[in-house]
Image (spheres, rainbow, N blue to C red):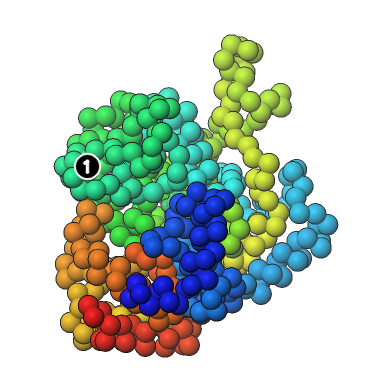
Amino acid sequence: PFIQYGAKTKKSYELMKEAEDYLPGGVTANIKHFAPYPIVMKKADGAWIEDVDGNQYVDYLMAYGSLALGHGHEDIKTAIQEQMIQDGTFLFGTPHELETTFAKKIQSYYPSMEKLRFTNSGTEATLLAIRLATAFTGKKKIAKFEGHYHGGYNDVLYSINPSLDEAGEEESPEAVPESSGLDLYSDERPLMLPFNNIEATERLIGKNASELGAVIIEPVQGGFIPAKQQFMTRLREITKKHGIILIFDEVKTGFRSALGGGQEIYHIKPDITTLGKVIGGGFPIGVVGGREEILTISKPNATGDVFNVGQGKKSSAKEILFHSGTYNGHPTILATGLATIERLEQDFDQTIAYTNTLKAEIEKLGNKANIPLKTLGLGTIFSIVCTRDNKIRHYRDLQNTNLSLRKELDFHLLNEGIYTKPMNRYSISTTHGDKEMEATLSAYDKVLNNRLGG
Ligand code: PMP
């Protein structure tokens, strides 16, 4: 498929060559890159995306799940226009009414977020969550799960996808740095825990409890590997018992695994939750919220101080956790986010139905063609896993599936007009319908029966 890919994406190749003269690797985010070179996109409409060579694709990347309503949705365009016309500005830099309106809307789906703050990305949200948790408990060590991503910064950029020979034993995984430079700033690595392995997790947390301020977790790893219920229930119990803050990073699962995210599915009340992606409607946002007594430490004090004034400067004042950002609570983005949630309230069930049918039909086609292929996911995200094994518990199991078959499948599908970044997930939008289903299944049928392995 790689030869055909080259033939179909000539202009992408040219543009990426030129981009490399200015941008390292030709990209503005490492994740946009894939070998041999990524496709340069130009236009989009609903569930469809078009590249610079004029090839059209059914888009299943949906900007890494951010676009719950597909591309260019009218509700979002209207929301942008109305906000700008009504308010006469793009940005106040002051409090405004939509902040409370949007906070209420989010809280109606995430009641565990008793108080919340807006940020500009998921990364900033988890960063603030960790600062809140460590400040609140006075314990500076954090724990995360192997294979879970929480943003690209020093505290958490460990063991997202380490090679199995570096990763250590499943029962006590190594924290493998995923970037150069991490250890130059701090030699503190997070405690690494094995997802869906409650015995080892419980033992590791117990051993480190006196130092651990927070455990951060994606309730559904990568949005597609579900936690076992017993694992989640027990994780909640032990973190509570040891006075460790449990952070649910729902940047990916929020308004996707279910409208109320992983916490709705597992009936778990985390101490802190982070959201992002979907709730911006395609624009940058993050939210961090949680127990009132924790979030309240970021409250400016009665004298109006916003920075920490507790360290000997004014002995009577209490400590303040600093949180700020010029663009926090951006009015246009809160308007697009609100429009997204309101549309999802109408169309979420239909999006789930599309996802479930697509998963079932893909598996049927795989079976018919006798190709080891499964779908794995919850809500409106899933991934394709090339294996006959029914028990994918975590990233180690994924590493043991047929990754080269998956890659070959993805490139064939690209050639047939089905887009996701190779090896990535499928995120469904409200605009995926009959036409997209038909195009996708006929591409799968063709690839699974005629192309694969050929
Ligand atoms: N947490 C999770 C679970 C994510 O999936 C992501 C983004 N893929 C982030 C945090 C970081 O969010 P952002 O890219 O908006 O900074």
Residue 134's x, y, as percent?
44, 30
Is residue 96 placed above or below 410 in the rendered structure? Answer: above
Side (left or right) of 361 relative to 257: left
Q: Amino acid at mark 1?
A: Glu
Quadrant of the image occupied by residue 402: bottom left
Side (left or right) of 380 relative to 93: left
Residue 375's x, y, as percent?
29, 71
Residue 330's x, y, as percent?
68, 51
Q: Secondary structure at mark 1?
A: loop
Quadrant of the image occupied by residue 336: bottom right
Residue 130's x, y, as percent?
45, 36
Residue linked to disc 1: 166
- Is disc 1 surrounded by few (<14), some (14 to 19) or many (20+) residues within 10 Å? few
Side (left or right) of 378 relative to 109: left
Nearest the viewer among 384 and 291 is 384
Side (left or right) of 184 relative to 226: right
What residue appears at the point 44 percent right and 80 percent down from the top-left corner? 417
- Does any portion of residue 421 appear in the rendered image? yes
Is residue 409 placed above or below 242 in the rendered structure? Answer: below
What residue appears at the point 45 percent right and 44 percent down from the top-left corner? 152
In the rendered image, which quarter contains the N terminus?
bottom left
What residue appears at the point 30 percent right and 68 percent down from the top-left corner? 407
